[in-house]
Amino acid sequence: MRATDKIEKLFIRKVLRQEYLPGTQIPSEREMAAEYEVGRPVIREVLQRLERDGWLTIRSGQKAVVNDYWKEGNLMTIVHLLAEEESIPDEFIVHLLELRKSISPAYVKDAVIHKPLSVVSLLKESEVVPDEAAAFAEYDWLLQRGLAAASPNPIYLLILNSFGDLYVKMATHYFYEASYREASRSYYRELMTASLSGDGIQAEFLVNEMMEKSIQMWKAQTKVK
């Protein structure tokens, strides 16, 4: 790992662990260079990257200030958050599930309308998925990517691709419950019926309903209120 990448990762970890609080100043370039035993140009590059990604505000002649990344961050902030899986709170997973609920019905509807046979083929594979958490998680991730790819809007797949590793890890945890796996099998069958008739509206309804159930199940599983 390059020195800039390592220092950037360590800084973000400190922010997530609240060692650096929003609104506070961080050490100067000189102090950070001494701490990490690198030259000031390395620190300067790290700080510029952190500012670009919403973690810091750099002010000429003054120490940089830590941002509230929930308010000042951007899509790259999410990418960094997902790279710090051990530091992600359960509430953040709920936020991601709610985001998924917002976009999944749209790309599934598009997929069913524009490429129903592709959707049917993807769902057919659910019939041979072993009844175990890891297998279900892997299949569900491939299904989501396939559905997004079948939509004529390529942005959906780009968004999903940012969440791959975390999605499979969290889905594996989710699918440990046998009842959740059975609920998903039932959902896959109903979505298959809608896809066979090319009914995008019904598919959209089914996805929205299942996403809401998934959020409630995850909250129950992790005791998120």
Image (spheres, helix red, strand yellow):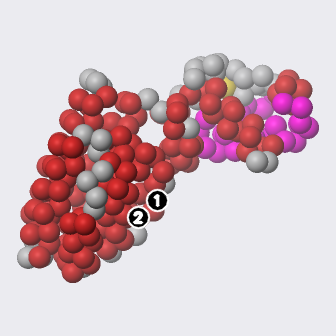
Q: Which residues are magenta?
A: 36-61
Secondary structure of residue under mark 2: helix
Residue name at image x 52 percent, y 31 percent: 87
Return the mark for residue 7.
none
Q: Which mark is residue 161?
A: 1
Is residue 33 one of those drawn in magenta?
A: no
Foreground: 190 or 79?
A: 190
Image position, residue 194 (x, y; %): 10, 69
Residue 170: x and y in percent read 39, 43
Q: Is residue 43 above or below residue 114?
A: above
Query: Neighbour class for label 1 at 10 Å: few (<14), some, many (≥20)?
Result: few
Marks 1/2 in contact by CB < 8 Å: the verdict is: yes
Q: Amino acid at mark 1?
A: Asn
Residue 52, percent from left and from top:
64, 45
At label 2, the amino acid type is Leu
| Picture mark count | 2
Quarter-of-image position of residue 39: top right
Using the numbered discs, state the Cα–Cα distance from disc 1 to disc 2 in whole angstroms: 6 Å
